[in-house]
Amino acid sequence: MSSFAWIVAGAFLWAAGAAEAAGAGQAGGAGDLKVGIAVRDVTPDGPVWLSGYSARNKASERVDQKLLVSAAAFDAAGQDRFVLLALDNCEVSREFNAPVLAEIERRHSLAPGAVIVVSSHTHSGPCLARTLPAMFAFDGIEKERVDKYSEKLGAALVEVVGAAIEDLKPARLEAGKGTAGFAMNRRVYRDDRVDFGENPVGPVDRDVPVLKVSSPEGEARAVLFGYACHGTSIAGDDFYVVSGDYMAYAREHIEAAFPGTKALYLTGCGADSNPSPRGRLIHAKQHGLELAGAVAGVLSRPMRPVQGRFRRAFARIDLPLAPPPSREKLAADAQDQNPYVARRARAWLALLDGSKPLPSSVSFPMSVIRFGSHGSDLADLTFFFLAGETVVDYALRLKQEHALESPWTVGYAFEVPCYIPSVRILKEGGYEADSSLIYYGIYGPFLGRTESMIIEKAREMVRGLKEP
């Protein structure tokens, strides 16, 4: 190990030890709050096609680390309940989620929107059935492997929610925030186009929010943490390795430093940010260590109490798309040399042939969960859960507009229908605004009022939750 690596590792271990010493006596204000934690292993049993990159041409070769789904169930004196699912996977679609959520809601009498699947967005996790249909079209043994893994994952999601609810115990919460520096805006401007690269002056969110869950006596049980950056540290020679990327390595470091504590990662709104540097497995491990160190640093300092009472709101809004293409355009695209363009066009032609309307909008689920005194203008903690590959502008704007709410912005929540661009990105164009829609089987782009619709719905939800 290099001297630099020893210094970084030593700093992390020092912070972890300080956090253990400082964490035992913190105040909490749990009230009637109960929290349950559960974890299930969702590592594939054998080779399976990995999601995130269309350039892959074969199934996975080996497993570098276990993939997990972790659940945190929150119960407010039996009056309301929600469950967070932190999943090591690129993303889940509405079509994949629907039967899983229906079974969970049936078993546990949970309301729609009360189960929030947050995908880590690792690009080194298995493909899922009925997800990214224009990017992946499997047959034969590869389809069998993907279908088998999807069934395994669906069953694990149902099981882990039940286990977390069974684990409900009195709890107290504390929150804090650190920073990590490896997220880099990836949109660079070359002549008349926007390309992938590193833009050191582009917008980015480097906050590391942390929520500590303890017993009433102060014993740490779980740590929730987040970061706004793509799960794309790994590529190159490690292109076919199963891994949770830097997010899972950070989790492993945190859990090793705090035995008995479970760490859950909640992905931020970093759809237009990449890790820097990137390209190898070692980069994922380096970023994981840095992120874990940031979390340990937060835990080593006094954290603010979070009152256990919470209110939540859930909504689906329809984000408008540009008018759909003509049949002639679809027919031409169906013959395109680009297989993803052709696949998308054929799916839309099938809708026309079946006398079904072409999509004119994208369904977008979102939720706000507010912890603190009802009727107060100040919240102890407010989660903003946004679906899709949400770009950083949403995090920055929500944090600015709702600063008194102690905001924590989470992307890739519920389901991932596609990228969710801001007005800025729609005007600039590029992958997040346009060509990424091909892989999601959507013709666009979104209309310019998309951002204002999401922001206004968030305002409306916060207003409602603040009422006495």
Image (spheres, grey):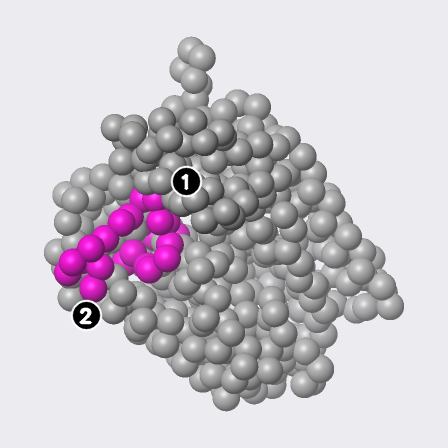
Give residue 45's mark. Answer: 2
Q: Name the residue: 44% across, 37% down.
A: 437
State the residue in front, 254 or 431. 431
Give residue 62's mark. Answer: none
Tell me the chief SS of the magenta region. loop
State the residue in front, 438 or 205. 438
Mark 1 falls on what kind of element? helix
Residue 467 as seen in the image, left or right of residue 202: right
Rendering coords of residue 309 (x, y %) = 72, 74
412 in the magenta segment: no
| Residue 4 visible in the displayed image | no
Q: Which residues are magenta?
A: 120-145
| Residue assigned mark 1 | 349
Give the residue type at disc 2: Asp
Nearer the N terminus, badge 2 or badge 1?
A: 2
Rendering coords of residue 334 (x, y %) = 33, 33
Residue 422 as seen in the image, left or right of residue 291: right
Rendering coords of residue 409 (x, y %) = 59, 52
Residue 56 as seen in the image, left or right of residue 400: left
The image quarter containing residue 392 is top right
Note whether 139 is above or below 201 in the view shown.
Answer: below
Q: Name the residue: 87% across, 68% down.
A: 468
